Image (spheres, rainbow, N blue to C red):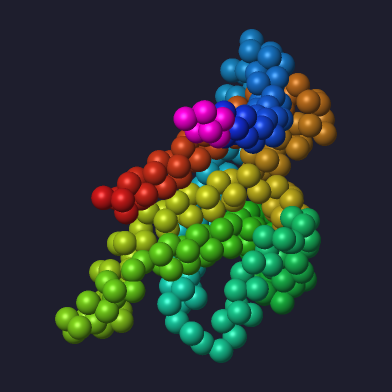
Amino acid sequence: MMMKITMRNHGRTGLRLLMIPGILLLLFLVSPLVYFFFQLSWSEVPGQLFNSTALNSLLVSLLASTLAICVTGILGIPLSYLLARKEFPGRGFVTLLIYLPLVFPPVISGILLLLLYGPYGLIGTPFANAGLELDTSFTGVVLSHIFVAAPFVVIAARSAFEAVDPALEQVAATLGKSSWSIFWRVNLPVAGAGIVAGLLLGWLRALGEFGATMIMAYHPYTLPVYIYVQLSGPGVPATLPLALYALAVSVIGVGLVLWLQHTNSRQRVL
């Protein structure tokens, strides 16, 4: 009996020791956010948030991110399925290419995009000659967002497809369903929650994109670019109210991702 009590006490002591670094990390992550709220000049918040430039920058970010994720979903989900379910030559190399934008410095991503889609680039030159420059435009913003967000969507969707039980596909195949039908009626619905979570994460990544967008399309202002403009001009106090926009959207987006993951895990248990 004494041995059990001693082991239990040791277990609790070990648990407390494990909690200490976790608590320190949480304090490190939360303290800037808490301090931020005490530094806000709340009387100036409405004027900063609701001026036309701030609202337009938020609208540009929301529209560009949404359009970018729609394009990424249409193009990336089929690719994710192939990577998850099919063996083909160069599969590992394709995976490498998808991961590369995740590790590129954002400024480098912007430079690479500008070289190709800018007024002197291979793709950008014909458009520029027609008076439709792809950079310094809403199109440039969308292109930047697609480049940085696509890996999140593809990787998340691939993981969701890999989690689908192959037995479900085998049953559908024995019923005479084609690969196309199995994809639409089995894989896509079962992996749906994980795919949507990946789309939301990609959307949030696009919404917060700064470096590539700054290089590729300084105008029209996205919210991160406008925050940088305010930081370079009026200074830090002018940027603080704008951070509330980013914070609100992030909380909503991450909350939805966590809710989807929780719902999906409960469905698997049941």
Instruction: Indicate yes or no whether the magenta region holds residue 5.
Output: yes
Q: Which quarter of the picture shows residue 104?
A: bottom right
How far across and how far down the image is residue 185, in percent? 25, 69
**Image: magenta residue range:** 1-8
| Identity of the residue furthest to the top in this view | 43
Identify which residue, 106 or 62, lies in the foreground. 106
Residue 13's place in the image compared with 210, above or below, is above
The structure residue drawn at horizontal position 76% and vertical position 36%, both measured from the top left corner, is 229
Q: Which quarter of the picture shows residue 173?
A: bottom left
Q: Is residue 10 left or right of residue 251?
A: right
How far across and how far down the image is residue 237, in percent? 75, 21
Q: Is residue 232 left or right of residue 269?
A: right
Residue 125's place in the image compared with 25, above or below, is below
How far across and how far down the image is residue 208, in percent? 63, 44
Identify which residue, 165 or 209, lies in the foreground. 165
Q: Is residue 12 visible?
A: no
Instruction: Indicate yes or no whether the magenta region holds residue 186.
Output: no
